[in-house]
Image (cartoon, grey):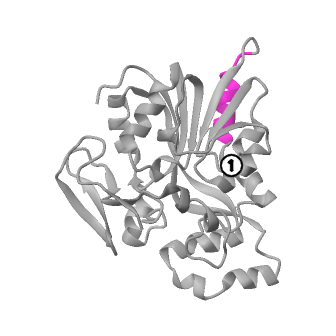
């Protein structure tokens, strides 16, 4: 495996840190200066990491979705992005068109339901996902966001469940700021590592995924640090309920308890035709945030 070694905090540059948990070759650490929680060794082979079994492989412990290709998954994603659709629809005028870049777009499910006045494009590192996005007729860059040469500015940037996967968080936020129009918006979702339930579960919290998640955020960290980087927080809230299929729920539970995979519950769900049943699940906490370009970067 290829790793990037993080010897200091990626945001504030602090060297002093506390080890929270150890996972084989990696440590989850907390910066003692700004409070950022991150892995000290992070996977750098992104093209390999987000292809193959990431989107579909119920038998493999590396899968992150049971079946991302399914129509059920598209409908669930549409619901999960509801706050973003609502905000965009309420803040566009019929007198002009708007530009939007979806960073880490997956299969482009979010792009399917945008208002007509929004001209969208996408960035996605996974070649499998890019094939699906191209079917929508959307301009898509197949590359790591930080490596894409972007010469225009956007009214809206969206990054759903993307920030926690970055290897250079500061560069990610700075580039988002740079390619946003004055007063432009960045809409994000990220796991809420600061929720009480995640804290209580400790090392077993499902949010902790050393293979994929490099950075871990709580609301307080965002409130303190994003304004220092030239962003104004418009809304920030933690949600605790989400809808997902039963087969995906079983897979998510296996992140914290790998023995679940050995129980072959997915076979039982498939045999009983229960796997695609959609349930409302009480999650450990997810953050929905809308932030706005306010000033030049100062951190």
Residue 38 drawn above or below residue 254:
above
Q: Is disc 1 surrounded by few (<14), some (14 to 19) or many (20+) residues within 10 Å?
A: many
* Residue 279 sits in quarter: bottom right
The spot of residue 84 in percent (x, y) is: 64, 37
The spot of residue 274 in percent (x, y) is: 79, 76
Quadrant location, the C terminus:
top left
Whether residue 272 appears in magenta in the rendering, the answer is no
Q: Residue furthest top?
A: 95
- Say whether residue 94 is visible: yes
Closest to the observer, 90 or 264: 264
Q: Is residue 77 left or right of residue 234?
A: right
Range of the magenta residues? 82-93
Whether residue 83 appears in magenta in the rendering, the answer is yes
Q: Which residue is at a point 38% across and 26% down the rendered structure image? A: 230
Q: Give the main secondary structure of the magenta stretch.
A: helix
Closest to the observer, 121 or 150: 150
The spot of residue 102 in percent (x, y) is: 62, 38
Q: Which residue is at a point 61% across and 33% down the rendered structure image? A: 101
Residue 19 drawn above or below residue 264:
above
The spot of residue 194 in percent (x, y) is: 39, 54
Q: What residue does disc 1 label?
A: 130
- Say whether residue 233 is visible: no
Residue 72 drawn above or below residue 170:
below
Q: Is residue 26 left or right of residue 59?
A: left
Q: Secondary structure at mark 1?
A: helix
Q: Which residue is at a point 61% across and 53% down the rendered structure image? A: 126
* Residue 122 sits in quarter: top right
* Residue 152 sits in quarter: top right
């Amino acid at each position: 495996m290829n790793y990037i070694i993080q010897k200091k905090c990626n945001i504030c540059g602090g060297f002093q840190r506390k080890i929270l948990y150890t996972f084989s070759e990696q440590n989850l650490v907390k910066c003692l200066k700004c409070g950022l929680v991150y892995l000290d060794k992070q996977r750098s082979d992104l093209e390999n990491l987000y292809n193959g079994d990431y989107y579909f492989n119920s038998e493999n412990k590396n899968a992150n979705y049971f079946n991302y290709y399914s129509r059920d998954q598209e409908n669930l994603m549409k619901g999960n992005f509801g706050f973003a659709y609502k905000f965009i629809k309420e803040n566009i005028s019929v007198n002009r068109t708007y530009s939007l870049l979806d960073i880490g777009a997956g299969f482009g499910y979010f792009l399917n339901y945008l208002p007509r006045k929004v001209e969208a494009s996408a960035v996605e590192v996974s070649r499998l996902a890019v094939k699906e996005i191209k079917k929508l007729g959307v301009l898509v860059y197949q590359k790591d966001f930080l490596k894409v040469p972007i010469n225009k500015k956007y009214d809206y940037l969206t990054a759903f469940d993307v920030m926690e996967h970055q290897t250079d968080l500061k560069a990610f936020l700075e580039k988002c700021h740079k390619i946003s129009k004055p007063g432009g918006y960045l809409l994000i979702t990220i796991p809420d590592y600061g929720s009480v339930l995640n804290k209580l579960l400790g090392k077993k919290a499902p949010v902790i995924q050393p293979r994929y998640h490099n950075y871990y955020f709580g609301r307080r960290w965002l409130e303190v640090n994003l304004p220092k980087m030239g962003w104004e927080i418009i809304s920030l809230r933690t949600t605790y309920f989400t809808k997902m299929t039963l087969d995906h729920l079983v897979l998510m539970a296996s992140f914290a308890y790998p023995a679940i995979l050995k129980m072959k519950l997915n076979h039982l769900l498939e045999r009983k035709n229960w796997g695609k049943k959609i349930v409302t699940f009480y999650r450990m906490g997810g953050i929905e945030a809308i932030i706005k370009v306010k000033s030049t970067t100062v951190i």
